[in-house]
Every structure is written in C-alpha cells, then in structure tokens.
Image (tube, rainbow, N blue to C red):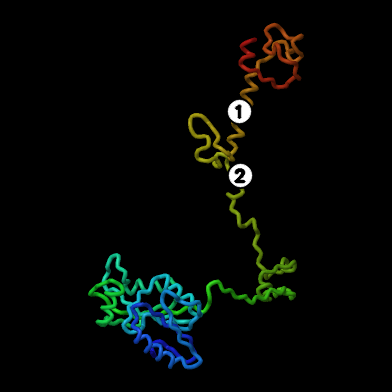
Amino acid sequence: MADYGISAGQFVAVVWDKSSPVEALKDLVDKLQTLTGNEGQVSVENINQLLQCNFDIILSGVIPGSTTLHSSEILAEMARILRPGGSLFLREPVETAVVNNSKVRTTSKLCSALTLSGLVEVKELQRESLSPEEIQSVQEHLDYQSDSLLSVSITGKKPNFEVGSSSQLKLSLAKKTSPPVKPAVDPAAAKLWTLSANDMEDESVDLIDSDELLDPEDFKKPDPASLRAPSCGEGKKRKACKNCTCGLAEELEKEKSREQTSSQPKSACGNCYLGDAFRCASCPYLGMPAFRPGEQVLLSSNNLSDA
C-alpha cells in the first residue's frame, strides 16, 4: 500500500469488474479504509459505471487476481474524474511480443494511451509474471491465451489545472507620466565631434582641403563614348539600347531630323508656302494647305507620287 502514496483524509476510488474476486476486493477496501481514516473515503466503483465524482487517487486493476483491460474511453473517464494533481495507478496484463490485432496491448502502447487521455508523468512502476489465477482469469474473462504475458503497474498524474480553466493576468497598463530618460552623453565624446568657428582660425587644428582629395584626372570631362554600355551602338546598324544614358539616342535623333530636313523638296519659284493659287502645276505642295516660310512640311510618299 505504501507504493500508492495513500494518506489519511484522501478520497480513493477502487475500480472493479466481473473478473475481480469478491473476497480480495473486500480485503483491499478494508486496508484502504484503515489508511484514509475517518476523514477520508474509499469508493468501490464498477468499471462500466463510474460515478460523476472527483478523486485524489484512483486504483484500477490492482485487486489481486484481477486482469482488467483499460480501453481508451475508460482511461479518459478516469482522467476526467480525477482532481487536478490527482494520481492514477493501474495494473494490466500486457504483451511482451508484438502480436497483430491483439486485444492485449504492449507496455509502450498502454503508456501512450494514458498520455493521450490527458495524464502527465506517465511511468512504469513494476513488471511481474502473471500468477496461475491471473492466467486462468485472462482465459476466462478475456478469451485470450498467450505465453508472453506479463503484469505491469503504471502510474500517471492529472495536470494541476482543469481543461478550459482560465486565469487573469496582472498587467500594469497605467500610462507613464514621467518623460523618458535620455541616455547620458559623454562630454569628451561630444567635444570630439564638435567643430566651432574658432577652430577654423586655430593653427593647431588640421583642416583638409577637399580639392586636395581629387586627382587631376578627376577634373577631366569624360568622353561620352566611354560612358556607353557595351551593347549600345554595336553592330553594323547603330542603335541605342533601351533606357540609353550615354547620349547616343539623342545623337541618332538629331541625325534623323537632319536627314528629314535635307530630304525636303526645294521650291523653284519660292511661292509654294502661299497656297495652290501661287503654285505651279508641278509643285510638290499642290493640294496642301498654306504654311509659313521656313516651316518644315513633311510629305508622305503617296503625296510625292501623286504629284
């Protein structure tokens, strides 16, 4: 009994099923009542009809000769009726070999089931062989037979909080009225980076002329050709690249304007700008509106052919 940590004044539940011997159950309850005393309570509950109660400690499958198997639903119900910080002690036959589709779990799977039910600090306490009575109980009540069965005792605790519980955080949201404290400035450091007008006349202060930092090559105007990108103007046909910044685009535009100006037909009589009334029969501007003297007039190839 000392392994369960039961003391006076605690509420203890003993879970039993049809495989639990009656005399052994009565003997266990008498011993537990002695430990809990008059202030404590020992409840005996059937595994299929757990009451809506809260317990500090739950013992299941610990009755000598009992071979209880705890399903995931039963473990979840036990974890629910435990008080926060309460402990669960259970004893169950387990398989030491991996058997497919076996109703008896291994120790690792049983520990995993306890963890999934919401318990923490799950650990194995003891492992021992089944007694002849327990082997017979497994065959009769579980309809299971195996030569690799052991009895394992496992414990787990419920966390010290209920699911869905909340707690208010104590936060200081009062506005600070005092101005923020500025970091102290080292006077020596401030003086080091300060230059006054008097320092300009102080011979002990070395001042550097900014022009002395430049070489004679820095004053030369760069050649526009050296500013061109490698692909700008290359090839048989001169062509400026996209977003040209070397001046080739403006240069090509000026050349194009000069070619258009030189390609304009010259007037033989000098009266072409006055209109059709003053133009001769072979005038290239025939049919075009009058324009100012010297104004550039662009004629399409259709107009030139029609003339």
Using the numbered discs, state the Cα–Cα distance from disc 2 to disc 1 in whole angstroms. Answer: 24 Å
Is 61 left, or right, of 225 in this rendering?
left
Which numbered dot is residue 144? none
Percent coordinates x, y for residue 191 in the rendering: 68, 73
Percent coordinates x, y for residue 44 in the rendering: 43, 83
- Whether residue 98 is visible, yes or no, is yes
- Whether residue 84 is visible, yes or no, is no
Is 194 left, or right, of 142 in this rendering?
right
User: Going from the N terminus, do you reach mark 2 or mark 1 first?
Assistant: 2
The residue sitting at 28% across, 75% down in the picture is 140
Q: Nearer the viewer, residue 38 or 261?
A: 38
SS at mark 1 in the image: helix
Mark 2 is surrounded, within 10 Å at the Cα level, by few (under 14), some (14 to 19) or many (20 or more) other residues, namely few
Which residue matches tag 1? Answer: 255
Task: Tell me the quarter of the picture where residue 261 sits.
Answer: top right
Percent coordinates x, y for residue 284 in the rendering: 67, 12
Above or below, comparing residue 59 to residue 201 in the picture: below
Which residue matches tag 2? Answer: 221
Percent coordinates x, y for residue 272 in the rendering: 73, 13
The residue sitting at 42% across, 88% down in the picture is 5
Camera-nearest label, 2 or 1 = 1
Is 241 left, or right, of 141 in this rendering?
right
Q: Nearer the viewer, residue 274 or 68?
A: 68
The N terminus appears in which quarter of the rendering? bottom left
The amino acid pointed to by label 1 is Glu
The amino acid pointed to by label 2 is Lys
Task: Tell me the quarter of the picture where residue 282 sits.
Answer: top right
